[in-house]
Image (tube, rainbow, N blue to C red):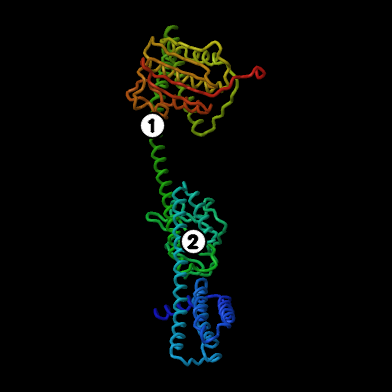
Amino acid sequence: MIRNSAIHTFLVQTFNSKLSQYLLSIFIVGITALICTPMATLQNYHVVSFILLFVVSILSTFMGVGPVLLSSTLSALAWNFYYIPPHHTFHIEKTEDILIFALFFIIAFVNGVLTTRVRRQEKLAREREKRTNALFQLTKELSKASGIDEVLKVAGEELKSHFFLESVFLLQDGNNKLVLSDRSGGGLTLTTDEMHAAEWVFAHSKKAGSHTGKFSDLHVSLFPLGGTRINPGVLLVRQQGPVRDDQESYWDTFLVQISNALEREFLGELAQKVRFLDESDRLYKTLFNSISHELRIPVATIMGASDSILNSSISQDVRSALCSEIFTASLRLNRLIENLLNITRLESGHISVRLDWYDINDLVNNVAADLKDELKPFVLKVSIPEEMPLVKIDFGLMEHVLYNLLFNSTQYAPATSVIETRINYEHGNLILEVIDSGPGFPEDMLENVFKKFFKVDGSQTGGLGLGLSIVKGFVEAHNGMIAVENVATGGAGFRISIPSEIPEMNEM
């Protein structure tokens, strides 16, 4: 069986040339023999053999083995019949002519076959180089792709470019269930039978469909995309015929590269989900513990003061003091709720900035009035140049920004110290600085100051650690920037830069 198969392969490779090549070889040999007719003399007939041998060598450079064998035979017979004496017969009188005739035929045939084989090897080398380059390009493009959608896009384009196939990728949903989702893309639709076949391919990791032994009545071919840890899914294509033997390893390598890229992205998504769930769980615990602690204190204060007012005979002065405590606790609750609402707006992306022209002095005065009680133990120093122009900001958001910065300073700065607010306009930007005389931040924690729930270790000020995160979010909503540093004289310094053009008079 092996010998018969090898003979069959040889015959197919030898005589698979087109009919036009056989006809062309007959025509060229005939024309050459006709042109060489004047040399049919006793002195020159050997020269004709070299000319015919040269023609056969030329033909072998662009024709198959079959036409070359035909041209070699015809050349030898034509030389014998027309040029070797006696002419117009196949009889050869001289022994040396018989030897030359035999050598001519052998040399012409061997030369043609060897040249054809070299040409075939060159063609195979070019094909291997082309395939190697295609695999390199596929690997490079897949390595640059970020996300499953990009990997599928690259894979579909490469399959269409090199195999001329429209493809559909059926991917698993993470629970080993095959689904055809929007991200699979492709230009084909699936019938119930094709979907059933795809599920079989996914479960058994074997190919099926047309030109295979399973589900061969289908008009599509399905190939498993197997990974080392998980199976990403199945590739479905509509092809005219089976993959050729000489292309099978090329096709399999293509699929392996695509499968590896999909598996990489699947594992990346799973890892990201795990990190997200872990972070969500950590934030939930932090938020729950912080809110429980922050709510307990003002609620307990309100409940205790209210109970004393309702169930005790107390003087007017004591009643006023208890009412004041209730009001202070209510403000603390309100501030807590506002911070939670603001951070929710930032996280959901539903925050909108409504810009208009405002006097920055009004902003500072409003915030100072709201923080009147908190600022009593401190010296608030405000520095605003007289020529300060109007600025285009969202007044409500910037109130929250300045409020949180000043309130943060009151929680850390020592009593009677100076809290300085500097406001200026430089190079098309509103510059707002808040500097206190507190302990500042540890140098290794400066980069975490604006993160949610960040609190300095050992801090006794309470709060959820959301104030500065909200400040950063509101500033960035203005397309601005905020930075923090420890000042040389002690304390922390916050610097905000928000782009704001100078208003024209006709806009006022």
- 25 or 282, which is in the foreground? 25
Residue drawn where x is 39% and y is 11% of the image:
417
- 223 or 49, which is in the foreground? 49
- Using a 10 Å C-alpha cutoff, classify the residue at mark 1 as few (fewer than 14 neighbours), some (14 to 19) or many (20 or more): some
Q: Mark 2 points at which residue?
A: 198
Quarter placement of the N terminus: bottom left
Quarter placement of the C terminus: top right
- In the rendered image, residue 230, in percent from the top left (x then y), is placed at 40, 54
Q: Residue furthest front?
A: 43
Q: Is residue 287 left or right of residue 84?
A: left
Q: Can residue 367 be seen in this view?
A: yes
Looking at the image, do the residues carrying marks 2 and 1 touch, with CB atoms under 8 Å apart?
no
Image vertical order of residue 143 relative to residue 410, above or below: below
- In the rendered image, residue 288, in percent from the top left (x then y), is placed at 40, 31
Residue 328 falls in image quadrant: top left
- Amino acid carrying label 1: it is Thr
Residue drawn where x is 55% and y is 14% of the image:
388
Query: SS for tag 1?
Result: helix
Image vertical order of residue 27 relative to residue 443, above or below: below
Residue drawn where x is 44% and y is 82% of the image:
106
- In the rendered image, residue 184, in percent from the top left (x then y), is placed at 52, 53
- 423 or 79, which is in the foreground? 79
> Disc number at residue 286?
1
- Using a 10 Å C-alpha cutoff, classify the residue at mark 2 as few (fewer than 14 neighbours), some (14 to 19) or many (20 or more): many
Query: SS for tag 2?
Result: helix
- 382 or 92, which is in the foreground? 92
Q: Which residue lies furthest to the right in this view?
A: 506
- Amino acid carrying label 2: it is Ala
